[in-house]
């Protein structure tokens, strides 16, 4: 009987090793970093830098990542088998695991359509009470959400392109994404004003999908004939498809690179590095999390 009991206990222990283990957070806090996403491995470094900055500065918090683009999420799952949740899935999982204090931190540049959708998701979860709700659910602001943010971003961009700006005849062309028919798109013009105030005639801001367009950038360049050299760079967290194709695609006749060449600009270089890789941006990202927690 004694031997039978020991054998039975061993069998139970072996079986338990095959039962999925669910860990519960016991009221701990979590940070959910939310990005549009990218399927380009090189561009992903910009997002990972922000995630790692959060992990480094908030070691007592669980830090997770969500992508808002279903197309990108599915492509990554198909090609690499990595499963990245959308914000709904990520918040539901955090609730299921017992996290009660959650800080949603977007990586968006402006509070456009993508940010509005994230607000809707966070707002819906904030309405839930009881076991399916959170004790505290906060959502942060994008990088540009007013004149002070634009002034700060102008300082970051001037520092980012310090070496290129040492050449007095060099202009920096920045490509933002843009959000048509949305008031937040005006922040690109606000940023242009902030840049003009600190470095007049050196920066030219445009967008892929809204105002100002590349034609507007070219009109601005005409008012500064002293600018002979151009540097093209994305005004986006990642240097993904838009940066590599719409901005700097050598084989795309509609790319900004080729359009500017057709206008007579021959000395053009590119700096295809996402803003998320900039340590000043990462520092501001951490400050936004501190502000949420305060």
Image (spheres, rainbow, N blue to C red):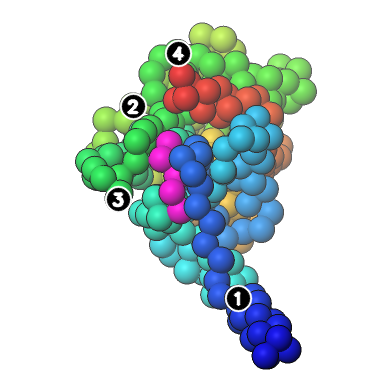
Tell me where residue 1 sits by quadrant. bottom right
The label nearer to you, 1 versus 3, is: 1
Which residue range is magenta in the image? 97-102
Q: Nearer the viewer, mark 1 or mark 2?
A: 1
Say what secondary structure mark 1 lies in: helix
Horizontal side of 56 relative to 71 (left or right) equals: right
> Of marks 1 and 4, which one's residue comes earlier in the chain?
1
Measuring 65% from the left and 35% from the top, which residue is drawn there?
59
Towards the viewer: 255 or 45: 45
Task: Indicate the position of residue 158 as horizontal and vertical percent values.
Answer: 64, 19
Q: In the drawing, what numbered circle is on residue 16?
A: 1
Q: Earlier in the sequence, mark 3 or mark 4?
A: 3
Report, in whole angstroms, how far the alpha carbon at label 4 lies from the one at label 2.
Answer: 14 Å
Between 164 and 145, the one nearer to me in the picture: 145
User: Callout 1 environment at 10 Å: few (<14), some (14 to 19), or many (20+)?
Assistant: few
Of all residues shown, which one is farthest toward the front? 1
Q: Is residue 115 left or right of residue 282?
A: left
Front position in the image: 199 or 83: 83
Label 3: how many Cα within 10 Å (few below 14, some 14–19, many 20+):
some
Q: Residue at x 30, y 49 (%)?
A: 131
Q: Which residue is mark 2?
A: 186
Q: Where is residue 204 drawn, in percent x and y?
A: 52, 27
Regarding mark 3 in the picture, which secondary structure is present there? helix
Q: CA distance from mark 2 to mark 3?
A: 38 Å
Which one is closest to the eye, mark 1 or mark 4? 1
Marks 4, 2: nearer the viewer: 4
Query: Seen from this angle, which residue lies furthest top?
Result: 197
Structural distance between the alpha carbons of marks 3 and 4:
37 Å
Q: Which residue is mark 3?
A: 132
Q: CA distance from mark 1 to mark 2?
A: 58 Å
């Amino acid at each position: 009987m004694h031997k039978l009991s020991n054998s039975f206990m061993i069998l139970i222990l072996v079986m338990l090793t095959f039962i999925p283990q669910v860990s519960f957070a016991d009221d701990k806090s979590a940070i959910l970093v939310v990005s549009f996403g990218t399927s380009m491995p090189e561009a992903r470094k910009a997002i990972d830098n922000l995630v790692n900055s959060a992990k480094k500065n908030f070691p007592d918090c669980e830090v997770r990542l969500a992508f808002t683009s279903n197309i990108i999420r599915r492509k990554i799952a198909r090609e690499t088998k990595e499963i990245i949740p959308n914000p709904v899935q990520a918040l539901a999982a955090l609730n299921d695991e017992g996290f009660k204090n959650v800080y949603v931190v977007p990586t968006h540049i402006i509070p456009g359509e993508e940010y509005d959708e994230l607000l809707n998701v966070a707002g819906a979860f904030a309405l839930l009470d009881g076991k399916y709700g959170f004790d505290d659910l906060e959502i942060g602001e994008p990088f540009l959400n007013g004149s002070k943010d634009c002034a700060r971003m102008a300082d970051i961009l001037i520092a980012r392109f310090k070496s290129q700006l040492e050449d007095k005849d060099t202009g920096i062309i920045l490509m933002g994404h843009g959000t048509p028919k949305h008031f937040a798109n005006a922040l690109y013009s606000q940023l242009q004003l902030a840049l003009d105030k600190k470095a007049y005639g050196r920066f030219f801001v445009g967008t892929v999908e809204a105002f100002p367009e590349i034609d507007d950038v070219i009109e601005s360049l005409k008012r500064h004939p002293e600018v002979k050299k151009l540097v093209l760079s994305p005004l986006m967290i990642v240097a993904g498809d838009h940066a590599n194709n719409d901005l700097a695609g050598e084989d795309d006749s509609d790319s900004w690179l080729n359009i500017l060449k057709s206008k007579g600009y021959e000395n053009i270089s590119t700096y295809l590095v996402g803003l998320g890789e900039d340590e000043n941006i990462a520092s501001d990202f951490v400050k936004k999390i501190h502000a949420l927690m305060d």
